[in-house]
Amino acid sequence: MDTEASDRPAPKGSGNPVMVFITSFSAAIVVAGAFGIVIQAFLLAIANLMALGSTFVWVTSAANAVGTLWLFIWTIARSWHVERRLQVGLEVDEPKFSILANFRGS
């Protein structure tokens, strides 16, 4: 895979903040939504197979919701960070797990 920045100018309208937000938000829905649904199905299957009570379901569902929310916000931040780097002609850098680092651009 080629990781060098292209010499071609960015397509017109690619720097529009509204379009970047819509793209980032859509990617976050897909990534975090798929993660949350799969993990929740796994947790419910475990609870059903092992006859665990509703407390297990509520606690693990809350933990899943927190993880899914973090992944949703991180995906928005990462996508926004990558779009900003591409707009100025920089290469995509290694992901950071900090949400704030992605919003700051560091």
Image (spheres, rainbow, N blue to C red):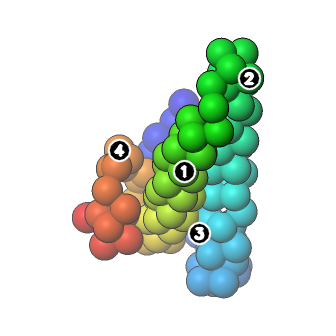
Query: Is residue 101 depicted above or below 44 in this figure?
Result: below
* Label 3, label 1: how far apart the Cα atoms are: 45 Å
Label 1 sits on residue: 62
* Quarter of the view holding residue 76: bottom right
Which secondary structure, mark 2?
helix
Sequence-first tag of 4 and 1: 1
Q: Amino acid at mark 1?
A: Ala
Viewer-nearest of discs 3 and 4: 4
Residue 95 is situated, as x and y percent measured from the top left of the image, at: 38, 47
Task: Rate crowding at label 1 as few (under 14), some (14 to 19) or many (20 or more) other CA atoms within 10 Å.
Answer: few
Tell me, yes or no, if residue 54 can be seen here.
Answer: yes
Viewer-nearest of discs 4 and 1: 1
**Mark drawn on residue 94:** 4
* Label 3, label 4: how far apart the Cα atoms are: 23 Å
Q: Residue at x 72, y 41 (%)?
A: 37
User: In the rendered structure, are the residues bearing label 2 and label 3 in contact, judged by CB atoms less than 8 Å apart?
Assistant: no
Q: Residue at x 49, y 54 (%)?
A: 66
